[in-house]
């Protein structure tokens, strides 16, 4: 989940892009200032997820990028 808000507390117009190791995996329009990406069917291994806010055309905001979040997927087989 990425939260975006302007310094005056309002939710800015634009999108949030979720990147995994430099590959764009999802673009989300925030609702009430929150953009949610649920990773499913990811390959096994470590994922480096970054969220980037991209302001809408003409919006008086600048873009921003989150710190990298590392996620680890395990390949489990139940018998």
Image (cartoon, rainbow, N blue to C red):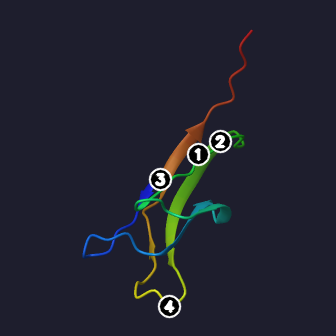
Closer to the camera: disc 2 or disc 3?
3
Question: SS class of the residue under badge 1?
Answer: loop
Which mark is nearer the camera, 4 or 1?
4
Disc 2 + disc 3, Cβ < 8 Å: no
Q: Residues within 10 Å of mark 1 (few under 14, many from 20)?
A: few
Q: Secondary structure at mark 4?
A: loop
Q: CA gap, disc 3 to disc 1?
A: 14 Å
> Residue 17: which quarter of the image?
bottom right
User: Which disc, if any, is residue 58?
Assistant: 4
Task: Report which residue position mark 2 lands on.
Answer: 45
How far is disc 4 from disc 3 in space, using C-alphas?
Answer: 30 Å
Q: Are marks 4 and 1 in contact (CB under 8 Å)?
A: no
Rendered position, 57 above or below 37? below
Rounded to the nearest whole Å, what is the CA distance between mark 4 and mark 2?
39 Å
| Image-based side of 30 in relation to 20, left or right | left
Report the residue at 73% width, 19% height from top. 77
- Give the mark, 4 or 3, whose residue is nearer the N terminus: 4
| Residue placed under numbered mark 3 in the picture | 69
Front-lying residue, 55 or 52: 55
Nearer the N terminus, badge 3 or badge 1?
Answer: 1
Judged left or right of residue 19, residue 60 is left
Instruction: Please name which of the two marks, 4 or 3, marks the residue nearer to the observer.
Output: 4
Q: Is residue 61 above or below residue 51?
A: below
Residue 12: image location, x then y, percent: 41, 74
Q: Which numbered dot is residue 38?
A: 1
Q: Position of residue 40 (x, y in %)?
A: 67, 41
Q: Which tag is nearer the camera, tag 4 or tag 2?
A: 4
Of pointers 4 and 1, the one earlier in the residue sequence: 1
Marks 4/1: CA–CA distance? 29 Å
Q: Residue at x 68, y 23 (%)?
A: 76
């Amino acid at each position: 989940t990425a939260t975006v808000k302007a310094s005056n507390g309002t939710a800015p117009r634009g999108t949030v892009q979720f990147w995994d190791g430099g590959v764009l995996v999802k673009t989300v329009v925030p609702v009430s200032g929150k953009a949610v990406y649920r990773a499913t069917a990811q390959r096994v291994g470590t994922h480096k997820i970054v969220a980037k806010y991209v302001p809408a055309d003409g919006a008086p905001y600048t873009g921003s990028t989150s710190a990298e979040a590392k996620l680890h997927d395990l390949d489990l087989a139940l018998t």
